[in-house]
Amino acid sequence: MTPLHQIKRLAETFVFNQFLYPRESLISDSTASNHDEVSEYLIKLLGNEATKIAFALDWCKQHPGLVLDLANSSKNLVLALVNQDITTFSLENCPFRINSLRSTRELLKPEKQSFFQIYPLEFTKFEIDETYQTVFASHQALEQSETEFTILGILRNVLAHLTPDGSFFVEVHNLDYLENQWNFRECIWRYVSDQLDSNPKNRIWEKTYPGTKESQTTFEVAVAKNLTDFSIYRSTLHLFNVDQWMKLFEVAGFIIEDCYGSWQKTPVTAQLPQLIFHLKVR
């Protein structure tokens, strides 16, 4: 067997291969409980952010009114809207992302800052005077909720804050895509990729396994700078198929206007990683 120190040296030269995976005995105890880092990786499983921003800009220009941005971890969507003088409110309950949003707001020109407000609140408890013409929600707002009842609470809060003719756009993971791509939920470490733009180069693995509830799946992402130093990031998501999501939306009081496989309004297929629902007030 190749000595560990030789494997380390080879790993600096060659692309890390699937035979060198993080064994439990080599994993450090640096587990991130708030899963901020892993969220960026999970978002990459969805569609191109640029198409979402283009869709949002086009939609909001044609449907003027206040916009609510719900748990979109990237600042780019908010910045794109605000720079077009579209008044946007961000609702977020993660301290890490709240601080990031506040830093972004401070970088805006003073005349643009008035178009950008931040609500550091729980998704299930927000009560705001404003009503919104358009709401954009990321998968984090719903899928990372503790229970299905919590998801319903978020949906009903959004419903209560939409104008009568308002629109709610929410993106979630496509369960059919995940189940068709690899051995989903089998608790096997899979090598994903090298982050070539990081210094030192990071190597990434993932494994998924059932959560404590039937609809939940836990993602663990291992980020390694070498063979013995791993950080494990964990995130548990509610994953439903199209019919299950539609039932939840209908119970919450929405009419489902449409469902897309991408922000370019592509039809839903098992080959696309996301579902995008366009919902209206019943």
Image: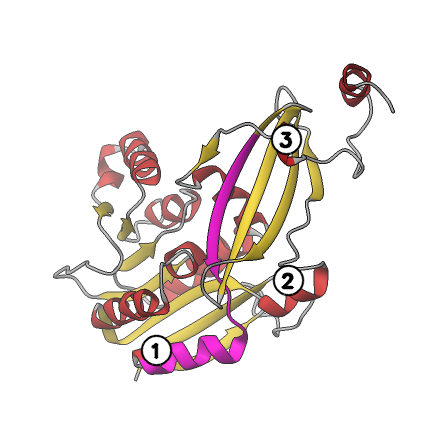
Task: Give the side of residue 263 with respect to residue 281, left or right.
Answer: right
Q: Which residue is mark 2?
A: 178
Is there CB contact under 8 Å for labels 3 and 2?
Answer: no
Determine the secondary structure under disc 2.
helix
Cα distance between the residues tagged 1 and 3:
50 Å
Query: Nearest the camera: 217 or 29?
Result: 29
Q: Residue at x 77, y 33 (%)?
A: 20
Q: Which residue is mark 3?
A: 25
Q: Which residue is mark 1?
A: 280
In the image, residue 48 sits, relative to residue 264, either above or below, namely: above
Asked if residue 236 is among those painted magenta in the image, a careful observer would answer: yes
Q: Position of residue 32 (x, y in %)?
A: 44, 35
Position of the N terminus by quadrant: top right
Quarter where residue 247 is shown: bottom left
What residue span does the magenta drawing correspond to?
231-251
The amino acid sitting under disc 2 is Leu
Q: Residue at x 44, y 61 (%)?
A: 58
In the image, residue 160 sits, relative to residue 190, either above or below, namely: below
Q: Position of residue 22 (x, y in %)?
A: 67, 34
